[in-house]
Amino acid sequence: MLKSFRYLLFPVSLIYGAVVWLRNWLFDKNILKSAAFNFPIICVGNIAVGGTGKTPMVEYLVRLLQNDHKTATLSRGYKRKTKGFAIADASTTALEIGDEPMQFHIKFPNVTVSVGEERLVAIPQLLHDRPDTNVIILDDAFQHRPVQAGLNIVLTAYNNLFTRDLMIPAGDLRDVKASMKRADIIIVTKCKPGLSSADKEAIIKEIAPSEKQHIFFTETVYSNPYHLFTKQQVNLGTDTSVLLVCGIANPTPLKSFLSTHFSGYDMLRYPDHHIFHSEDLAEIKKHYDKLQGDKIILTTEKDAVRLVKFEEQLKAYPIYILPIEHSFLFNEAPAFDQLVKGFIASYKKS
């Protein structure tokens, strides 16, 4: 029903798509100006709304680079309560910098995590404040045309490929399909387990990359849950009763994982980037108390940064975080890693 209703909005999508196309054309013709920096900048983005795995891809890149390079991340800081440029420090909260940057800051305390709506302004500020930085990862900036990244990594979800999608509001695309031509690397994320070589080749044929573009495929891998406050890991039995608390754009892969690994689970779903309040805590506790036997509360890393402030209220409850990562299929992780490292190594400073 919802899908049929969205199709009725197709005329609006045509208007929106025309506006986006015109904006891109103005940048392509250099009527609207964009700037390139004499510095290695990697952009991770997509052309659709909803979850394609940008956050775990940024984390993958940080893990790949942080030991050999002074790495920094720069995000817009979606739904934060502040404005302008900021670098995370020991007193920073998710409300000040946003969920994903706070997640980066917690997981990678030795990496510079920054936010700024205007990347064109934020990048020079970042380099001024952290002059030893030698690579910047832009989080969700593919549509931010005023800045030209040196390496564009663009994600598209296997179950909602951009080639089969429509512009919003009829579909999920926030940019025209032709924009994918600007990508250096295309990653098809959230692939089904055991994706065959034939399926891979069919998707590559459908996407039709240029000779200069590289395509990779990843699946979502869930690691052992760890406690929200103590960080202690736990191994869960299949008979464990699970209450999933999440406010993410696309919980479908997570639900599929829980269905496969547990006999059953309950779910409290909140809007994407939901800010939890005391009423939500009461709801969580009420649903948890109804569970029988060995039971646990699971949440995502993104939701955890908004729940951690309730330590006093939640410390008596077994609330655990379920971390996710990208795993490259067809043994192609080394090839992807080499592309990224090669981009930085070959970057020539004038």
Image (cartoon, rainbow, N blue to C red):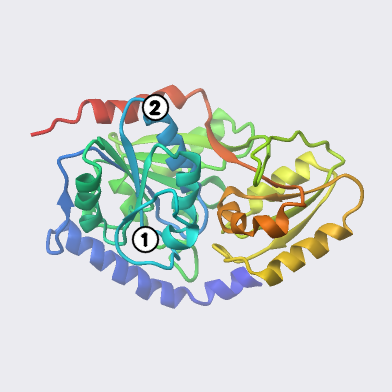
Q: Secondary structure at mark 1?
A: loop
292 relative to 81, above or below: above
Screen quadrant of the C terminus: top left
130 relative to 7, above or below: above
Query: Which residue has dot 1 on it?
Result: 175
In the figure, residue 67 lies in which quadrant?
top left
Residue beneath the point at 43% across and 61% down? 96
Estimate the spatial distance between the alpha carbons at disc 1 and disc 2, rounded to whole Å.
27 Å
Q: Position of residue 322 (x, y in %)?
A: 65, 43
Q: Position of residue 50 (x, y in %)?
A: 51, 58
Q: Position of residue 282 (x, y in %)?
A: 75, 67
In the figure, residue 143 lies in which quadrant?
bottom left
Residue nearer the viewer, 315 or 345: 315
Residue nearer the viewer, 328 or 258: 258
Query: Which residue has dot 2 on it?
Result: 337
Q: Position of residue 208 (x, y in %)?
A: 38, 42
In the figure, residue 342 lies in which quadrant?
top left
Residue nearer the viewer, 163 or 179: 179
Q: Residue furthest right?
A: 293
Looking at the image, residue 281 sits to the left or right of residue 93; the answer is right
Which amino acid type is marked by label 2?
Asp
Looking at the image, residue 126 sits to the left or right of residue 248; the answer is left
